[in-house]
Image (cartoon, grey):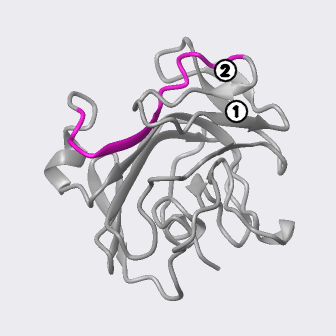
Amino acid sequence: GTDLGPLARPLIDGVGLPLNTWAHVCVAYSGTVQTVFVNGVVDNTQTPGGSRATTLNSLKIGKQSATNPAFSYFFHGRVDDVRVYAGSLSAADIRQMAIQVPNGLKAYYSFSDASGGTAIDYSGNGHTGTLVNAPIATADRFNVTGAYNFNSNTKAISASDTGLPAGTAPRTMCSWLRPTTLPVSGGYAIAAK
């Protein structure tokens, strides 16, 4: 299938994230090569097969978009501070993510407002998301309400992806993750189109 690229199932398959521990995961896509960073260190690099989505639909957080639910690859665990950038950020930019915000920010979900029925996009680009099947507001990595728990195969956030990079356009997506279970097979998605 097609996806927004970074943080989709094909990349996360090869990444060993620790259970019940926060990890910063960032995937930079150059237009041909995708590189996964875990806590600022390169973990996996690959040239994805298949096509990249060139039409806009919606950005999904907590699952991969799929018309067949069997291929949705839902994430099980907490997600905080999701960011989408135009352009493939450098390794140095990704290492500095905790203290600086690189140029090109297109969507930013801090989840500091984790309540109600929306996930506010703080980038100023209008990608506010709708909670699908009520992901649970929960403690983030600072132990304050500021993350969402995607604890079933139905919970997600859906937002407009108008203006987000598509096709082979370079892009970077980052998030803090705290998985509670790992998939038996098939992987899982954090954010995808």
Quarter containing the C terminus: bottom right
Which label number is shown at residue 149?
1
Instruction: Look at the picture and state if 118 lies above or below 73.
Output: above
- Examine the structure image and report whether residue 114 is included in the region drawn in magenta: yes
How many discs mark residues in the rendered view?
Answer: 2
Q: Position of residue 61 (x, y in %)?
A: 62, 47
Q: Earlier along the polypeptide chain: callout 2 or callout 1?
A: 2
Q: Quadrant of residue 10?
A: bottom right
Q: Is 155 within the magenta?
A: no
Q: What x and y, as percent, mark residue 67?
A: 81, 70
**Residue type at the position of mark 1:** Asn
The reply to whether residue 72 is visible in this rendering is yes
The answer to whether mark 2 and mark 1 are in CB contact below 8 A is yes
Q: Where is residue 129 in the image (x, y as percent from the top left)?
A: 64, 36
Relative horizontal placement of residue 105, taking residue 23 as reference (left or right): left
From the viewer's perspective, is 177 left or right of 41? right
What residue did someone put label 2 on?
138
Counting from the top left corner in percent of width and height, residue 103 is at 21, 42
Residue at 73 percent across and 55 percent down: it is 74
Q: What element carries label 2?
A: strand
Left or right? Give the position of 185 relative to 126.
Answer: right
Specify the amino acid type for callout 2. Thr
Q: Chief secondary structure of the magenta span? A: loop
The span picked out in magenta is 101-115
For the residue pair 151 and 108, the one nearer the viewer reads as 108
Query: Residue 26: in sight, yes or no?
Result: no
At 65% from the left edge and 30% from the top edge, which residue is drawn?
Answer: 148
Q: Residue furthest bottom?
A: 49
